[in-house]
Amino acid sequence: MDGAKSGDDALRRRTLIVVVPIAPSVPVLAWGSADVLKSVPGIKVLVIDVPRGATDIGLTTERLQTVTELKLRESGIKILSQDEWNKTPGGPTLVIAVNIVGVGCSIDVSFREIVFVSRQGKAVAIPNSETWGRSVAGTTHTPEFVVDREKELLDIFCNDWLKANPRQ
């Protein structure tokens, strides 16, 4: 019996090793629909300063900013200057956030704006509310992996933007 039991334990250990592979990235998490992007005249881009884990692999805030602005311009989405943004109702902002810890990373692209809700019969402003967002997590050792995932999320954003604001 002991031999059979130790054989079963060895099989379970081998099975565990086979069953627990680490994928390079997980599917995109999503919230919000294209409808929230309708009639927004343009957006400000805000890339959250990359953490030390990102700079350790050679990824910079400036590179993410450039990639984001280029992708938006290619899709015909107006990037607002600070002055234009200050004058635009709702404060529409596309926020890019990257986090890297060890070999794990997450990339978030979210559209934020001021949202008004009714509370006890009064309109209450909630600034910086995420009304659209996509996120992906994965494992990486390269800035190219992170930038490629960012571009994929930006493609989804641009497609939703164009769906809500068809070119005329």
Image: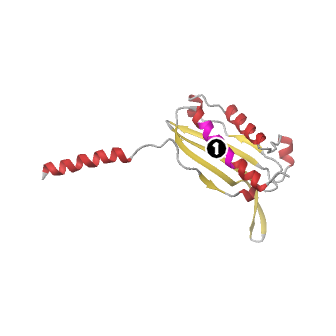
**Left or right side of 143 for 64:** right
**Left or right side of 155 for 83:** right
- Image coordinates for residue 82, horizontal then vertical, percent: 83, 41
Q: Is 35 one of the magenta-colored residues? A: no
Q: Secondary structure at mark 1?
A: helix
Seen at 77% across and 44% down, the residue is 75
- Image coordinates for residue 43, horizontal then vertical, percent: 79, 46
In the image, which residues are magenta? 146-156
Toward the viewer: 36 or 49?
36
Seen at 52% across and 44% down, the residue is 25
Counting the numbered discs, the total is: 1
Seen at 73% across and 40% down, the residue is 71
Q: What colour scheme governs how the chains and residues are painted in the rendered image of this protein? A: secondary structure
Residue for badge 1: 152
Toward the viewer: 125 or 144?
144
The residue most toward the front is 168
The image quadrant that residue 36 belongs to is: bottom right
Q: Is 153 one of the magenta-colored residues? A: yes
* Residue type, numbered disc 1: Glu
The residue most toward the left is 1
Seen at 62% across and 54% down, the residue is 30
